[in-house]
Image (tube, rainbow, N blue to C red):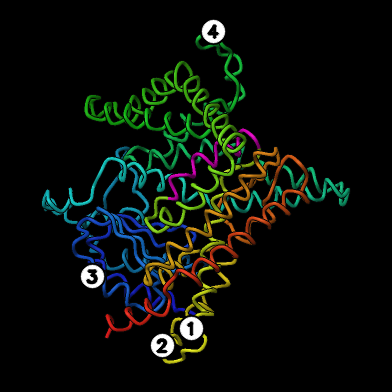
Amino acid sequence: MPIDASSTAAAILPIVGGPANVTSVAHCMTRLRLRLADPSLVDREALRALPGVLGIVADDDTCQVVLGPGVVTRVTAEFERLATSQVPTAQEPTTPDGAAPDRAAVAPAAQGPAAQGVEPPPARKARGATPLKAVLRRLAAVFVPLIPALIGCGILAGLNGLLVNTGLLPGLTPALAAVAAAFMALIAVFVGHNTAKEFGGTPVLGGAVAAIVVYPGVAKVTAFGVTLSPGQGGVLGALAAALLATYVEKTCRGRVPETLDVLLTPALTVLVAGLGTLYGIMYAAGAVSTAIGTAANWLLATTGAFAGLVLGGLFLPLVMLGLHQALIPIHTTLIEQQGYTVLLPVLAMAGAGQVGAAVAVYVRLRHDVSLGASLRTTIRSALPAGLLGVGEPLIYGVSLPLGRPFLTACTGGAAGGAFVGFFAMLGDKVGASAIGPSGWALFPLLAGNHGPGTTAAIYAGGLATGYAVGFAATYVFGGVTAAVAAQRAHSS
């Protein structure tokens, strides 16, 4: 039965503390991502019990509600509408340049406890908050909104490559190439915009400074005795440039006279951060980006099977904690450099192990109708999404609540990762031209160095290995019947 987005959003809002507690709203492929003024107001058990909620990931001031693909987009739109409409509008806030900001973005935050002069207790703010978690959360906030465009353009790039290789529709391929490549050519601008927005600067100034990274005219600039090239530093350079712009802007805001603020602050921000980008950031970020590409290639070419085993085995816990989004800058850097990321197909094997484990649970419970009927229904409904690479329904609905099947699913992911990594050691690279999908959905985005047939065959072999090992490990060592019985006794 389809989930009603309006009623789901209306049910979630009071459980997370109401509109006054919500400071920002966003979503990724499967999760509604809420930043909260006081996370202690969230009733986690009530949130988990809502129909359609597959799980939650709560950490310091962030709450992620797992809803699944498609559903999350509709629920997010309704949630933003409800959160905004229920906030009093006594005074319209303004941006530093005097313009009225987007109400959907600022209204909930403007009415939060901090805006009312009530600061959350230090214990609440510090609980679970670590510098690493804060950095990962903010990186996700910068890059997650870009995923739909990365997916769309990646699929079109794959389609265009297929048409070029087969010689079909030669008159269309140049136009299709332009449509597919334009976003990647200017992705630095979007990264800069989102970075400034996330860190409290003016988004358009962050985008303006980040645009320097991809401007063709930088080819006339020499830094450290080396002539710069457009795109040098990539998304990492854009991220650093926008951070510098935000710092310069905030410094200017408190020092420039108000009468001159609208003129001097933007000019000084672009000038100082722009020169810093040209004469420092692009060179340094270019070196880091090159090192990332070299390290990824070396890792798989030299220790491919072991590296694949580790990466495939650890990815499900990262997904469970919501930390997998922090890998987006690395994937994006590899795509910019090489045309594809060699890490994503390896990490996608974790989903294969999860699918194999879920099928094993289903088979184990086939003769115990009273004990496993509900769980088998959950598996049947979540399995299609799992095959397409959306693992949260199976993680939160099946393997994680049972305990040991989650570990055996990781074993399947490790085996599939080792399979793909082994072929990387033999010189057969398997990569993805875009990020976001995995499982079967990744086939249209596959790219490699030995043709589409070889690339698809290796990836399919990895999936089959992950399915088989995840199934076998769970069937033999998963302790499924005992885990389900214990879960049932606990819930009753």
Q: Nearer the viewer, mark 4 or mark 2?
A: 2
3D distance between C-alphas at marks 1 and 2: 8 Å
x, y percentage for residue 212? 52, 26
3D distance between C-alphas at marks 1 and 4: 68 Å
Residue 314 visible in the shown view: yes
Q: Main secondary structure of the magenta part?
A: helix
* Residue closest to the eye, 321 or 2: 321
- The amino acid at mark 4 is Gly
Please tell me which residue is depicted at 50% across the width and 89% down the height of the picture. Answer: 367
Q: Which mark is residue 277?
A: none
N-term-proximal mark, 2 vs 3: 3
Q: Which mark is residue 371?
A: 2
Assign a secondary structure to mark 2: helix
3D distance between C-alphas at marks 1 and 3: 32 Å
* Residue closest to the eye, 23 or 359: 359
Please tell me which residue is depicted at 79% across the width and 50% down the height of the picture. Answer: 162
N-term-proximal mark, 4 vs 3: 3
- The amino acid at mark 1 is Leu
N-term-proximal mark, 1 vs 2: 1
Question: Mark 1 highlights which residue?
Answer: 365
Question: Mark 3 highlights which residue?
Answer: 43
Please tell me which residue is depicted at 74% across the width and 43% down the height of the picture. Answer: 177
Q: Nearer the viewer, mark 2 or mark 3?
A: 2
x, y percentage for residue 132? 31, 41
Stretch in magenta: 324-338
N-term-proximal mark, 1 vs 4: 4
